[in-house]
Image: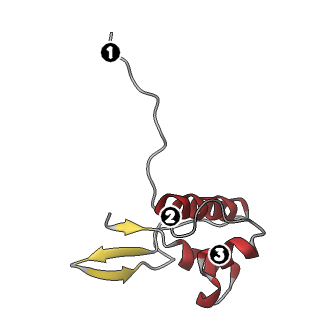
């Protein structure tokens, strides 16, 4: 992956909170959500981050790519950059 959405940055910018309030457990707590699963489990952390992203979308956030790698360096992507995303899913086409 060369581009991604850093949910911590998006959360902090959208809800106007300092970085100290963007830890996973704090974000869930502020959104009145419980942590599901085992802490520090990669799969469970990912599921909880996805739940936060869904909630942010429901609250009106437009999630945008905000970080990327360029020549081995972590770069911040401007929030004024055009929206990026995957194309809409297509139904599979079957050959006769």
Q: CA distance from mark 1 to mark 3?
A: 48 Å
Of residue 94 and residue 38, the one placed in the foreground of this image is: 38
The chosen color scheme is: secondary structure
The x and y percentages for residue 10 are 57, 75
The x and y percentages for residue 18 are 63, 90
Res 26 quadrant in image: bottom right
Is 66 located above or below residue 20 in the figure?
above
Q: Which residue is mark 2?
A: 41
Q: Which residue is mark 1?
A: 95
- The residue that appears at 46% across and 34% down in the rendered structure is 90
The x and y percentages for residue 84 are 45, 61
Callout 2 secondary element: loop
- The residue that appears at 51% across and 77% down in the rendered structure is 79
Q: Residue furthest right?
A: 32
* Mark 1 touches mark 3? (CB < 8 Å): no
Q: Which residue is mark 3?
A: 25
Location of the N terminus by quadrant is bottom left
* Mark 3 touches mark 2? (CB < 8 Å): no
Res 51 quadrant in image: bottom right
Is 34 located above or below residue 10 in the figure?
above
């Amino acid at each position: 992956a060369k581009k991604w959405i850093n949910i911590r940055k998006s959360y902090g910018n959208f809800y106007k909170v300092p970085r100290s309030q963007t830890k996973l457990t704090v974000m869930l707590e502020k959104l009145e959500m419980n942590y599901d699963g085992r802490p520090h489990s990669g799969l469970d952390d990912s599921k909880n981050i996805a739940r936060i992203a869904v909630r942010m979308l429901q609250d009106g956030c437009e999630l945008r790519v905000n970080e990327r790698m360029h020549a081995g360096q972590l770069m911040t992507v401007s929030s004024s950059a055009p929206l990026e995303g995957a194309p809409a899913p297509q139904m599979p086409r079957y050959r006769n």
